[in-house]
Image (cartoon, helix red, strand yellow):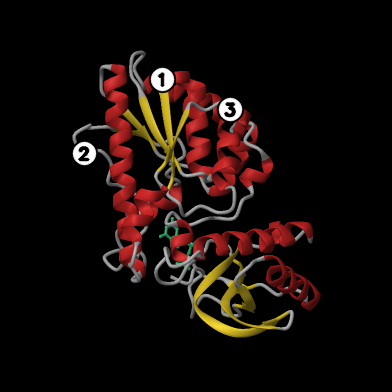
Amino acid sequence: SWNMENLVDEEIKVIKGTVGPEDHVICALSGGVDSTVAATLVYKAIGDRLHCVFVDNGLLRYKERERVMETFERDLHLPVTCVDASEQFLSKLKGVIDPETKRKIIGKEFISIFDVFAHDLEKKLGKKPAYLVQGTLYPDVIESCPPPGSGRNHSHTIKSHHNVGGLPKDMKLKLIEPLKLLFKDEVRQLGRILNVPGAFLKRHPFPGPGLAVRVLGDVTEGNALDILRQVDEIFIQSIKDAGLYDSIWQAFAVFLPVRSVGVQGDQRTHSHVVALRAVTSQDGMTADWYYFEHKFLDDVARKICNSVRGVNRVVQDITSKPPSTIEWE
Ligand code: XMP
């Protein structure tokens, strides 16, 4: 019979049978569930011939780099190199306002860093890595290859998702996609068997371009990213404390490129406005805005204005998708 325990053994057998005994494999970890579970499976099959990289693009959430690296290293023992490329990304994003341009720049920088990682590894090993692990899921496979007559038309991309394709060209890497027949909930079950911490498996989705699509306009303006990280952390922690995290598909804060007048102490202020967004959804394609109790919102807004310097106003996004999208950019 077909169960998840068998599936782990099956997958490991297949990976062992595919990757030659001398072959090396590379993997980019995003900090998300899919790439983490895929890498963990491959690690079980081939051990230290797997080489992972995690890129800090300067657009991660509060303490995110430390938190995911701890899971990779302490809980999963993955061989992972952490590259701090914050300055490289942020200098390329300086002055950029257009959301799609931001995504393209981030995608391009990521590829260039991954390329350097792969070539450095080649030098170290004295040979090219042979395979690339990707956490592609079944729905991704269907989406990029719509069945004929399905009426899906992908020549019209609403947002360019940078996580797919475009990796070191001269390497001729072959792909290993151990999750490509699975749905998200099956990947989570696999993750549990592989000892991926429960809290990690339940994390809300986070877009590849990170906080760049949550700071509207120029992400390098003032200390927008720093303010957003603090506000987001307070919001998410309050949601967890209230026991609401698992009932919400995604929750986050957005930094708005405007200032409004406020009064704090007996001082007039001219400070930043942040928006809170929380939605329920099945698959991200449509979404409903989430109803918090007024008391909860009141507490969160007070906490934000009292503890985050530079914020004097908090608003809530009360639109669903459609007509809005989940992210603001
Ligand atoms: P939207 O904003 O289009 O988002 O309603 C739907 C889902 O996709 C995520 N999202 C992205 N994920 N790269 C990603 O990897 C992107 O550029 C991107 N844009 C949106 C969003 O967080 C939501 O879960």
Residue on which the image places disc 2:
169
Q: Is residue 6 above or below residue 104?
A: above
Residue at (66%, 38%) from the top-left corner?
A: 197
Tell me the quarter of the image containing the N terminus: top right
Q: Is residue 290 above or below residue 63?
A: below
Q: Which mark is residue 49?
A: 1
Q: Residues within 10 Å of mark 1 (few under 14, many from 20)?
A: some
User: Residue 187's x, y, as percent?
Assistant: 55, 42
Measure the alpha-carbon separation of dots 3 and 2: 35 Å
Amino acid carrying label 3: it is Asn
Name the outermost residue toward the front: 266
**What is the secondary structure assignment of the residue under circle 3?**
helix
Residue on which the image places disc 3:
6
Residue at (50%, 43%) from the top-left corner?
A: 34
Quarter where residue 191 is shown:
top right
Labels 3 and 1: the sequence-earlier one: 3
Q: Which mark is residue 148?
A: none
